[in-house]
Amino acid sequence: MVRGMMDRGYPKEFAERCFNQIKGFGEYGFPQSHAASFALLVYASSWVKTYYPDVFCAALLNSQPMGFYAPAQLIRDAREHGVTILPVDINQSEWDSTLEESRFDGRAIDPRHRSMRDVIRTGHAVRLGFRQVKGLAEEAIARRLIANRGEGYHSVHDLWLRSGLEKADLERLADADAFGSIGLSRRAALWAVRGLDAAKAKEKLPLFDLADGADLRPETRQVLPAMLPGEEVIEDYRALSLSLKAHPVSFLREDFRRLGITRSVDLLDVPNGRRVTIGGVVLVRQRPGSAKGVIFLTIEDETGVANAIVWPKMFDRYRSVVMGARLVKIRGRLQSKDGVIHTVVEHIEDITPMLGLLQKEARRFGVSQRSDEALQSGGDPRQRRRAGGAEVSMRGGPHIGPIVPAVEEGLWPAHGGRAAAAVAVAVATATGREAMFRMTSGMMSRGWPAQPASCREGGISIKELLRGY
């Protein structure tokens, strides 16, 4: 290197200095410093999670989107370690999730983590922040709701007048069940929001300012029917992508029992090598480049997560189910060693239609159409608005086949994946979200060549637009 630089006219002293700098970096700069910094990061993260799971949970919630787990899974893990999770509330929450003084009860720790009862030192509960509510903007919440909160809001009308929030934001807060501190249920809060004037709060006449924000509009208190538990969970997932009340699979447990499906928590007692049947909502599909085509599937029920291994041969056989199903039943042989449990897939079945039981329950009691978005992957309203201009012209149309709600990056060729994803977005926009779930993985497997005439992604990725539960 030095000789080559000198041949090109660089001074020897300068060439040697460059060489020594590169040499120093090569010997320490990346391999060792990277390993040392990563080791420190891992140690610090593990220490915090071990002793202060409340701090760990709040920090990761405030760093979303990132990492491997969604907020719902982070919260589930924290609760299993005895951490109390408090809901979003207009009088208690900040934009970020925060810690509130709370007495730690070791008896709340899941039996699987009972060895941690004398280790965990937490003394706080985690209060979910407004960032968890879909559609809210940080600026509006921080500058209006939080800044004008004072000693607290007393009613929906009081919040509207003093904060100056748009009615749409108040409706999002009601959808998120954020009025608990003033004694309003989700349905009662929505009723109150929709009873507000059409004009913005800042446009109210000066005459009414003399009333010092008092609500001078007496109204007969309406007795609204209570929402069923399943309905509450649907609304929670639609507004927050999680629920502190229950897990969707908990409402299907009796059906799962009849199908012979073992709960995730019970896999700890199943001997190594035995065949089992597991089931749950699909959380993650991964195919690392170093795994030689093996797919790692993570599913979740109300008791925890279970991991499944899909060998390439099984993936070829069940490709549409592996890639498209949102609720699955898996039969295979259990592998258990040192507390690490996997199920090697021998058969996988799409049982997503079972989620329709929750939809039927909700519709019987007059839930709005939007309530189904948690089950049909409607996504964040902000993302839907950005994708609102998507149009498509498909010559001959796609094959109609198994459900494919998401295109996972890295599992299909980039060209085919982008084309099919764009078409899925456009079809969903033009004909409703039902159509998205009829898109087929055969589009890629058959080398489908059609390209959409136009598909505006609105500044976000197709993967984000199509990401499911």
Image (cartoon, grey):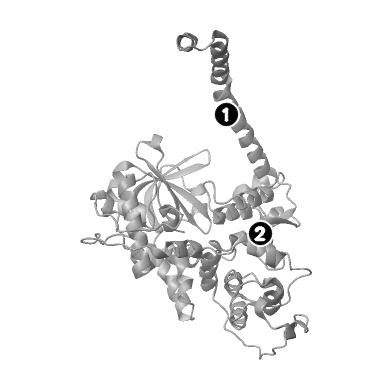
Residue 94 lies, with reference to residue 215, above or below; the image says above
Quarter of the image for residue 99 reads bottom right
Task: Using the image, determine if residue 249 lies above or below residue 33.
Answer: below
Question: In the depicted view, which residue is nearer to us: 144 or 38?
Answer: 144
Figure quadrant of residue 32: top right
> Which residue is found at the position 28% from the left and 50% from the top?
444
Tell me: residue 231, above or below residue 436.
Answer: below
Where is residue 421 shown, x and y percent of the image?
A: 35, 55
Kind of residue indicated by mark 1: His
Left or right of 433 in this view: 114 = right
Residue at (73%, 83%) from the top-left corner?
A: 206
- Residue 242, image x, y percentages: 55, 61
Q: Which residue is mark 1?
A: 34
Q: CA distance from mark 1 to mark 2?
A: 33 Å
Of 335 and 452, which appears nearest the observer? 452
On the image, the x and y values in percent for residue 92 come to 72, 65
Give the class, few, some or many, for how many residues have Cα within 10 Å of label 1's Cα (few <14, many ≥20): few
Q: Amino acid at mark 2?
A: Trp
Q: Identify which residue is drawn at 54% across, 48% down.
A: 66
Residue 347, visible in the rendered structure: no
Q: Label 2 crowding class (10 Å Cα cut-off): few <14, some 14-19, many 20+? A: many
Task: Give the label on residue 429, or none.
Answer: none
Percent x, y for residue 90?
68, 68
Q: Against 152, is 269 above or below?
A: above
Give left or right: position of 142 versus 25.
right
In the picture as drawn, the residue positioned furthest to the front comes out as: 9
Residue designated by label 2: 95
Q: Earlier in the sequence, mark 1 or mark 2?
A: 1
Of residues 147 and 12, the one drawn nearer to the viewer in this rendering: 12
Badge 1 element: helix
